[in-house]
Amino acid sequence: MAGPARPVAILGLGLIGGSVARALTRAGGWRVIAWSRAPDALERALADGAIDEVAADPVSAAASAPLVLLATPVPVILETLRALGPGLAAAGALVTDVGSSKSLVMAAAARVPGLRFVGGHPMSGAESAGYGASRASLFDERPWVVVPGPASRPEDVTAVGDLARACGARPVELDAATHDRAVAAISHLPLVASLALADAALASADWPVARQLAAQGW
């Protein structure tokens, strides 16, 4: 007989948060509580069966589960840690995130006394954003970086790895600085280069003609 479902609270239900919810529902054995600034995303996720419960606000979502996933952009993660960190620490919840910049997030988490925090970054994405683009298979066979904090318990690191595996991903343990250097090379630098190339093309005197000739990949 299967044991009770493991509660997890997801704050943010865009592409990544929505895909985590779908993946955990696909895996089974999880109870997904979610909060989002986009009410339509919550309604759709509930109707889809991707989540089990809608929380009224971030505080009640985080209070309802021993594991909390911050699935928002990095600036919002930083603000959430400032605003909710003391409450999460008092509740004893294990907190993780999906932010692409780990040094900033780990430093913010370290400033919250007593917070159980293990950083995370699933190395997967899509060309579209929002809950509507989410899918259960987004993380299948993809690396999911796990970044222990200076005071992380071994069981907390294991728990975040288990979350990644439940989503179909492969946990990869790294420190924050190594993660940031590697991601800058493999992800951020190509993006900056492509934006610079696009900007140069837009500034060209021949842009109207070039635009007519551009293929769908542009």
Image (cartoon, helix red, strand yellow):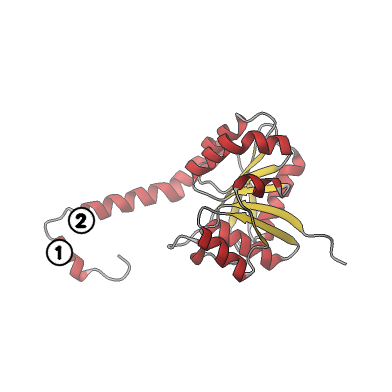
Q: Nearest the camera: 39 or 133? A: 39
Which residue: 60% across, 47% down? 58
Amino acid tagged 1: Pro
Residue 55 visible in the snapshot: yes
Q: Is residue 50 left or right of residue 30?
A: left
The percent position of residue 189, horizontal first and vertical second, equals: 39, 47
Tag of residue 202: 2
Residue, far left: 205
Q: Is residue 165 left or right of residue 109?
A: right
Which residue: 64% across, 63% down? 51
CA separation, marks 1 and 2?
A: 9 Å
Amino acid tagged 2: Leu
User: In which quadrant of the rendered image does the N terminus lie?
Assistant: bottom right
User: In which quadrant of the rendered image does the C terminus lie?
Assistant: bottom left
SS class of the residue under badge 2? helix
Q: Is residue 207 left or right of residue 183?
A: left
The percent position of residue 174, horizontal first and vertical second, equals: 61, 42
Q: Earlier in the sequence, mark 1 or mark 2?
A: 2
The percent position of residue 78, horizontal first and vertical second, equals: 53, 38
The percent position of residue 175, horizontal first and vertical second, equals: 60, 38
Which residue: 45% across, 60% down? 129
Per the image, the residue denoted by label 1 is 208
Residue 138 visible in the snapshot: no
